[in-house]
Amino acid sequence: MKKVLVILLACFSLSTLAQQDPLYSQYQFNQLMINPAYAGIYNRLSVGAISRFQWAGIEGSPKTNTITAHSALADGKIGLGALVLNDRFGVSNNYEVQLSSSYNIKFNTTTKLAMGIQGGFVQFGYDFSNVNLDFFDDPELINGHDNVLKPNFGAGFMLLNSNFFIGASVPRILNVSVRDGVTQSERYKRHYYLTAGVTAEIQRTPVKATTLIRSMAGETYSFDITLSAFLEDVMWAGISVRDLKHFGVLGIFELGENLRLGYSFELPTNKLIHGNYGTHEVSISYGIRYGYGRQEPIFF
């Protein structure tokens, strides 16, 4: 019964409110998920995957799986990238494919400005296969809502060197409205992102602070701050806070020059703290540096 109620409540909320972008705790280590300008911003080929399980233990809670790949070309002046995403929440089951391209302007040996665009498709759909009812006679539940495939595109920029970065982006510019039966519902509203970060060295230990501000078409705002330190040249260890309500820890392991493994854990301090086992996010990425150009440290 609890499972049915949660899924149906999620379905109701998603039919009356616009879908929100997935959340990420480890965005500062792979910003292609929120900004196409990140594609090829370093002189390397990078392939990564990240999975986020929000409010573990609650039926119908959000689950997001993302695969990214990007590379620098033309001596680091051009970047190309790709993103494939599956985002599930309750009966909502969405898929997304985006291709991105960026152009880098180097001001000196350490500072560059990247401008990026992306385009692709998002499929918004419902999955009623996990709904168990005694009387399954509602045609809306038997047939489900039609899947909706919509094109979308986005843009962003990043100013970056080894000591700081600042970025702004709108990953999906187009709002998406569909007609469910006799009503018009808004499946998606554009999100605006502003990110920034700085690094410093404290007693020979690299330390960095990053922040993200996210707004959904001027209606809702969210911000987070993460502080982390690079310990023994092996692991980034950090703490994070989102909206002064969600607190977390993260560990990102640098296994040699090419392989990176990450894990983060979050807990809310509001009523959601009861009945779930927190939010878990795991990531893996593999990168190959190119021989040309300056080999910048990968801090962001």
Image (spheres, grey):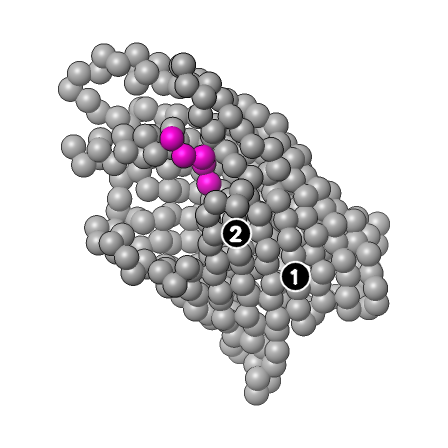
**In the rendered image, which quarter contains the N terminus?**
top left
Asked if residue 45 shows in the view, the reply is no
Location of residue 94 in the rendering, given as x and y in whole percent from the top left corner:
46, 32
208 on left or right of 53: right
Element assignment for label 2: strand
Identity, as a three-letter code, of the amino acid under mark 2: Arg
Q: Which residue is mark 2?
A: 214
Most common secondary structure along the magenta stretch: loop
At x 57%, y 81%, the residue is 205
In primary-sequence order, the first of circles 1 and 2 is 1
Element assignment for label 1: strand
Location of residue 76 in the rendering, given as x and y in whole percent from the top left corner:
80, 54
> Which numbered dot is residue 199?
none
293 w.r.t. 138: above or below? below
Give the residues in magenta.
16-20
Q: Which residue is mark 1?
A: 166
Location of residue 40 in the rendering, given as x and y in whole percent from the top left corner:
71, 51
